[in-house]
Amino acid sequence: MSDAPPFVSVKLPAALVNQAREAANTMRRSVASQIEYWATLGKALEHAGLTTSDSHALIARQERAVYHVSPPPAPPLSPELDDLHAHVLALAKSGALSARAQDAVAANKGKAARSKTRKAA
């Protein structure tokens, strides 16, 4: 049996910890769990036979990537626009918007057909 403690402290670059913090928020993990997850993935890739050149390419690509956190929702433009947006969403959910669009298309097709008939005559 090992005398090693269950947890130990390690020094990690602040940038890595910040990236882990952002990724952890998205995945609903702790920062430590996110870093442990990444380490497990790396270990699995090594055991799966990832070549040195493959790993260098993946690391280079990841270092160029930037983690993005979803921006906060935009503040409402105006109460009138919020009401209009809510009304359109309600119409879409109820199916009324689709029915109105189909009615408008049918009416326009009818007008176009009558116009063609008049021009032909």
Image (cartoon, rainbow, N blue to C red):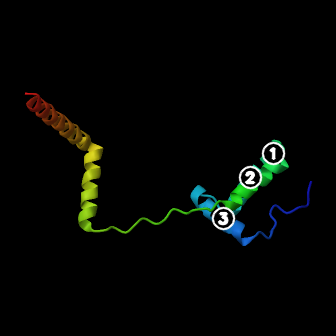
SS at circle 1 = loop
User: Residue 119 in the image: x percent, y percent?
Assistant: 10, 32
Q: CA distance from mark 2 to mark 3?
A: 16 Å
User: Residue 88 in the image: x percent, y percent?
Assistant: 26, 52
Q: Residue at x 71, y 62 (%)?
A: 32
Q: From the viewer's side, name the closer residue of 110 and 90.
A: 110
Mark with earlier residue (2, 3): 3
User: Residue 66 in the image: x percent, y percent?
Assistant: 62, 62
Q: Nearer the viewer, mark 3 or mark 1?
A: 1
Q: Is residue 101 above or below residue 78?
A: above
Residue under label 3: 19
| Amino acid found under the numbered disc labelled 2 | Leu
User: Residue 93 in the image: x percent, y percent?
Assistant: 30, 45
Q: Is residue 75 left or right of residue 65?
A: left
Mark with earlier residue (3, 1): 3
Other residues around mark 2 within 10 Å, as few (<14) / some (14–19) / many (≥20): few
Q: Is residue 121 left or right of residue 18?
A: left
Residue under label 1: 50
Q: Quadrant of residue 31?
A: bottom right
Q: Is residue 64 above or below residue 114?
A: below
Other residues around mark 1 within 10 Å, as few (<14) / some (14–19) / many (≥20): few
Mark with earlier residue (2, 1): 1
Q: Which mark is residue 58?
A: 2
Q: Is residue 1 left or right of residue 112?
A: right
